[in-house]
Amino acid sequence: MRSGDSLLRPAAVLVLLALVLTVAQHSAWKRGHRSLPERVVQRILSPGVVLFSRAGTAVGDLGFSLVSTARLRRENRALREECSQLAADRVRLAEIAAENARLRREVGCPLPPKLIRLGVVQVIARTPGPLRRRVTVRAASDVFLAKDDVLLEGGCLAGRVINANGPQAEAVLLVDSEHAVAAVDQRSRDQGMLYAEAPAAGRGDLLRMDKLVGRCDLAPGDIIITSGIGQVYPKGLPIGRVVAVTHSPGAGGAVSALVKPFVDLDRAEFFSVVRSVGAP
Amino acid sequence: MVYLGSALITAVAAVVEAAWAPWLFWSGERPELTVAATVVLGLVAGPRWGLSCGFFAALFRGALLRETYGSLFVAMMGLGLLAGAGGHRVIARRMIAACASAGIGILMFRLVMALFHPAGELGLTFWGALRASLYSAVATVPIYLLAAWGQEVALRSASPGLRWR
């Protein structure tokens, strides 16, 4: 009975206090701010919350670093090995290139044209319309563009200059309906011509490669590069990747491939310009 | 002593709960430390402590986590009183039982909150409540050990030679 009595009074006081606090909170929230007890409690306890938050974050960061240290070390080791491997490959390739040039000279084979980087041009105008895809580009004032200068983005072919006037020029893009480029499948060495594929809704820019000669071994995923035939573009510039191959029915049917260009020609704002010199 | 002690303990629990680090969340749930502290103190120290802890836990939690006082006071004080009155003499000295009681207490707490609030308002879900209950039961271990140690110290200072456990 005594313990019941001793509990009853504090319980009544606490319930009363709880009621007062609840009413105060409701009326304060209705007016759009917080009640005085809430503000007091928050003022007193907030530093503790901040302290514990920081401690929790610090412990988390420490744990994360400890866990990821081993992984990062492994990754770094692998990257270092890859780097040294690539450096060795580079030396080997330079040696092969030198040997290639020597042999070419010995057998009297013409040296491939050299590409000179002229600088960067900015797209300042675009021809509207889905078929005629041309751009007007402008270089720095000391750069003089010329017809047949090649536009690249990220080392990949984007188009070429067709009319030049000092640092300003009109260029035709790969996906222009009147443009074609001689190309070769890097893996199978199948050659063909690349044309702009008719635009279709919901599909990005695509090129169609028509097989020109001989047997055909085009496959999705193959990389298509310029073949240098026709000498409009230098040999070996990456163009795009094969996404589909179609065979016409019947013996000796034509083979064509859809190629997705590496360069997003709709969104490109800048291009590098290179000029081929020493072409035979 | 009861009020000061319970205010201190629940203040620490509310602060830790409000500052719970994001990387320690279990599928969006953190342990309900204030509820667990209320239940454990009710079990270990009796209904008066349970009630008092419930009051302060609701007060601090409502202010720090911006929850409405009405439902919090009902749920917390009810749980503290229930734990103290129902379990103080029976399971106070068993840690596993205290953890299980805290877990059940969380479920009851969530049930009361769900009765007062629409489910969408607080993001209350059945599986969320289960996860919070399990997580809180685990987090109850240090709270129980602290509470038991405090009880032991209090008992020894009152009458040397006596042991709580």
Image (spheres, rainbow, N blue to C red):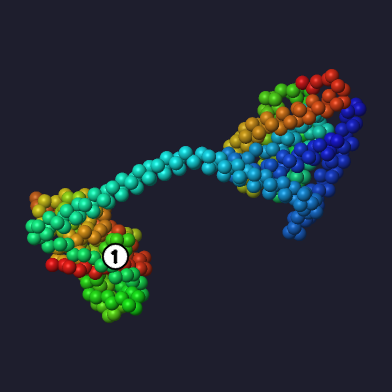
Q: How many marks?
A: 1
The image shows residue B78, relative to residue A269, as above or below, that is above
Task: From the viewer's side, name the closer residue of B89 and A147.
Answer: A147
User: Could you tell me residue B134's position as x and y percent?
Assistant: 62, 32
Q: In which image quadrant can residue B119 be found?
A: top right
Residues A58 and A49: in front is A58
- Direction bottom: furthest residue: A165
Where is residue B145, by image quadrant?
top right
Q: Is residue A83 above or below residue A238?
A: above
Q: Chain of mark 1?
A: A
Q: Position of residue B46 (x, y in %)?
A: 81, 29
- Provide the residue designation for mark 1: A152
Q: Position of residue A112 (x, y in %)?
A: 17, 62
At horizontal 87% and vertical 41% (from top left) the residue drawn is A13
Return the residue nearer the eye: A202 or B138: B138
Left/right of residue B89 with respect to residue A215 in the rendered view: right
Q: Could you tell me which secondary element the residue under label 1 belongs to?
A: strand
Residue sitting at x 12%, y 58%: A104
- Residue type at tag 1: Leu
| Quadrant position of the N terminus of chain A in the picture | top right
Q: Quadrant of the C terminus of chain A?
A: bottom left
* Residue A9 shown left or right of residue B114 in the figure: right
Residue B4: percent from the left, percent from the top? 83, 39
Mark 1 nearby-residue class (10 Å; few <14, some 14–19, many ≥20): many
Q: Is residue A189 above or below residue A145?
A: above
Q: Is residue B165 visible?
A: yes
Q: Residue at x 88, y 29 (%)?
A: A4
Residue B71 seen in this snapshot: no
Residue placed farthest to the top in the image?
A: B161
**Image quadrant assignment for residue B52:** top right
